[in-house]
Image (cartoon, helix red, strand yellow):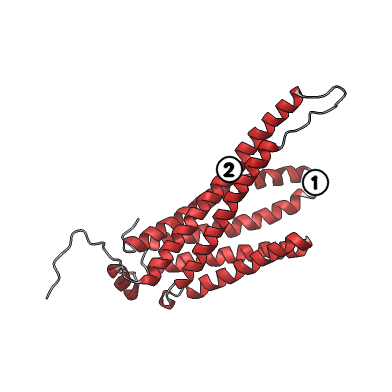
Amino acid sequence: MQDDFNPYAAPTSSMMHPRAAEWLRSTDDPSLQKVAKGLGLIYISICIILLSAILIGILGGVTGAMGAQRGARAMQPGEAFPRPEFGGMAIVMLLCGLGLIVGYTLGLIGTFMCLATPQETGAKGLITTSVVLMVIALVMTIANVAVENMALAGLANILSVAGGIAFILFLKKLAEFIGAIHLARRAQSILIALVVGVGLLIVSLGIAVTGGGAAIIAGLVIFVLMIGGLVVFVMYANLINNLRKAIQSGGASYV
């Protein structure tokens, strides 16, 4: 018997994988829904980390200025410089530091939840690679706190970037699987911007250390790259949130 037409049903895309259409119509597949929840945690973690970083800059600067002002008024005779007050700064740094830890932990949990990605998506290997690289980078970063080795820190950063690239490729593949081609294109744009930005940053840092007039230009390029990096970071966060919504709302129907 033919099903009655449902005007509220989410339309599907001809580019959507047949298995994805089956899963997303029923919304009963636990693996894809777990991935969506994992993406939600990652999005929340990004918001917390970004907010904590902004607060560290703003509140830290305000607290430091107020502390210096109070210290200047409280200078003892014969002192050349005011005695800074670090109490307020310490509290701000502690709270924001805890925010960074909470945000990073939520992001790590969300990433592990994405391991539930079905093999049929073709993205299973990418998310597995991303998790492995990120865990190794985390272990190296913690070890570097104890040994303070520049080579170890550099390798941890490289692995972290590689893990991030693998995760963006995972998002792109997953978006293609559910037929959300517009999101797959956004992922590709973010990936290109990331690779180009990292390349320009490395070149600019190399020029900056040489000194001279070229170093000034390199400094300006680095500043522009920092602004652009913030824009790409916001685009990345929106991609994750939109892909989560796409999975929960039926795939390609979400714009």
Q: Nearer the viewer, residue 176 or 151?
A: 151
SS at mark 1 in the image:
loop
Q: Gap in Å between the C-alphas at discs 1 and 2?
A: 31 Å
Q: Residues within 10 Å of mark 1 (few under 14, many from 20)?
A: few
Q: Which residue is drawn at the image coordinates 38% and 66% (left, top)?
A: 33
Q: Nearer the viewer, residue 147 or 209?
A: 147
Residue 54 is marked as 2
Specify the quadrant of the image occupied by residue 24: bottom left
Marks 2 and 1: in contact by CB < 8 Å?
no
Q: State whether residue 197 is above or below residue 129.
A: above
Q: Position of residue 196 (x, y in %)?
A: 60, 57
Q: State whether residue 37 is above or below residue 210.
A: below
Q: Which residue is drawn at the image coordinates 80% and 50% (left, top)?
A: 210
Q: Nearer the viewer, residue 168 or 36?
A: 36
Q: Which residue is drawn at the image coordinates 53% and 65% (left, top)?
A: 167
Q: What residue did someone put label 1 on?
A: 211
- Which amino acid type is shown beneath numbered disc 2? Ile
Q: State whether residue 52 is above or below residue 188.
A: above
Q: Is residue 14 left or right of residue 126?
A: left
Q: Position of residue 110 (x, y in %)?
A: 49, 63
**Image quadrant occupied by the C terminus:** bottom left
- Which amino acid type is shown beneath numbered disc 1? Gly
Label located before the other in sequence (1 or 2): 2
Q: Is residue 230 visible?
A: yes
Specify the quadrant of the image occupied by residue 14: bottom left
Q: Position of residue 180 (x, y in %)?
A: 37, 63
Specify the quadrant of the image occupied by residue 78: top right
Please identify the residue farthest to the left as the structure is shown: 1
Q: Is residue 14 left or right of residue 79?
A: left
